[in-house]
Image (cartoon, rainbow, N blue to C red):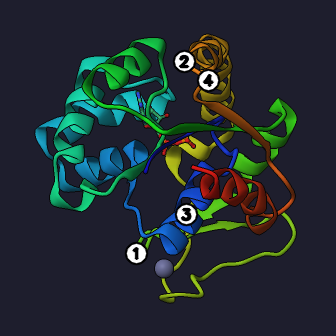
Amino acid sequence: MKIVLFGAPGSGKGSQAKLITKEFGLPQISTGDILRDHIQRQTNIGKIVEAIINRGELVPDEMIIDIICDRIKKEDCKKGYILDGFPRTLEQAKKLLEITNIDVVIYIDVSIIEVERRALSRRICPSCGKIFNISKKIIEDCDECGAKLIQRDDDKIDVVRHRIEKYFSQSEALIKFFKKKKLLKTVFSAESPEETYKSVRKILLKI
Ligand code: ADP
Ligand code: ZN
């Protein structure tokens, strides 16, 4: 099963991907994570994308498409995968459907106000990647591995606003495109990832 998760930054794509991985055993391919890993290792790609990401801009289509092409050829993708954060532009979406067939695009619908609130209260574990929300409860250390949580540079307020604007400027065209291809299924982002996952799961079980 090949799944695309689509939604605004902070819509909870990453959390849904992790829940799908747990139940369906498909690998999560997060372009954001792949890019951050390149930055951390200071690879050629990492050096190029660092400034772009920190400004909240999108990485060039060709670069991200190459990354995805390489990634989905790997052994663990034989039975399918979950794309999280790709495609993000119409160009990327068209290219994706040229290189492979997708079973479903799950669109996680959430309001601008809510995504802004969530992105600003998001913290991540730099060691294991677990995502936390500190809006209701202050959490300082990772409950999985004990590392001190950090805020991503691109989760700071100005950058968040920019990323969200970027997203909403592209999203309409993408939604239209996937609707036309009869791939789009919409779920509404609920209070908790577990609640949202109930709807996601229902869709996946029918595929
Ligand atoms: P979020 O979903 O919260 O925006 P991600 O971790 O998915 O965060 O992405 C972080 C950044 O990585 C994006 O703001 C963008 O600069 C870059 N990026 C990730 N995926 C793509 C993509 N498909 N196309 C272009 N840039 C991307
Ligand atoms: Zn951790």
- Whether residue 149 is visible here, answered yes or no, is yes
The numbered mark, 3 or 2, whose residue comes first in the sequence reads 3
* Residue at image coords 16%, 46%: 73
The disc at residue 167 is: 4
Distance, label 2 to label 1, CA atoms, is 39 Å
Identify the element where label 1 is drawn: loop
Q: CA distance from mark 4 to mark 3?
A: 23 Å
Q: Residue at x 56, y 55 (%)?
A: 14
Residue 127 is tagged as 1
Residue at the spot of label 2: 181
Q: Dots 1 and 4: beta carbons under 8 Å? A: no
Q: Is residue 60 visible?
A: no
- Tell me which amino acid carries mark 4: Tyr
Closer to the eye: label 2 or 1 = 2
Q: Mark 2 and ligand 1: say if the CB distance to the nearest ligand atom is below 8 Å.
A: no
Foreground tag (1 vs 3): 3
Question: Callout 1, which amino acid?
Answer: Ser
User: Gap between marks 3 and 2, in whole Å?
Assistant: 23 Å
Residue position for label 3: 20
Count neighbours of disc 3 (C-alpha within 10 A) and say few if under 14, some if 14 to 19, many if 20 or more: many
Estimate the x, y position of residue 71 in percent, counting from the top left: 22, 46
Distance between the alpha carbons at the discs numbered 1 and 4? 28 Å
Instruction: Give whichever of discs 1 and 4 has the lower sequence position.
Output: 1
Instruction: Quote the CA–CA distance across marks 1 and 3.
Output: 22 Å
Percent position of residue 22, x then y: 51, 74
Q: Secondary structure at mark 4?
A: helix
Q: Residue furthest front?
A: 206
Q: Are marks 1 and 3 in contact (CB under 8 Å)?
A: no
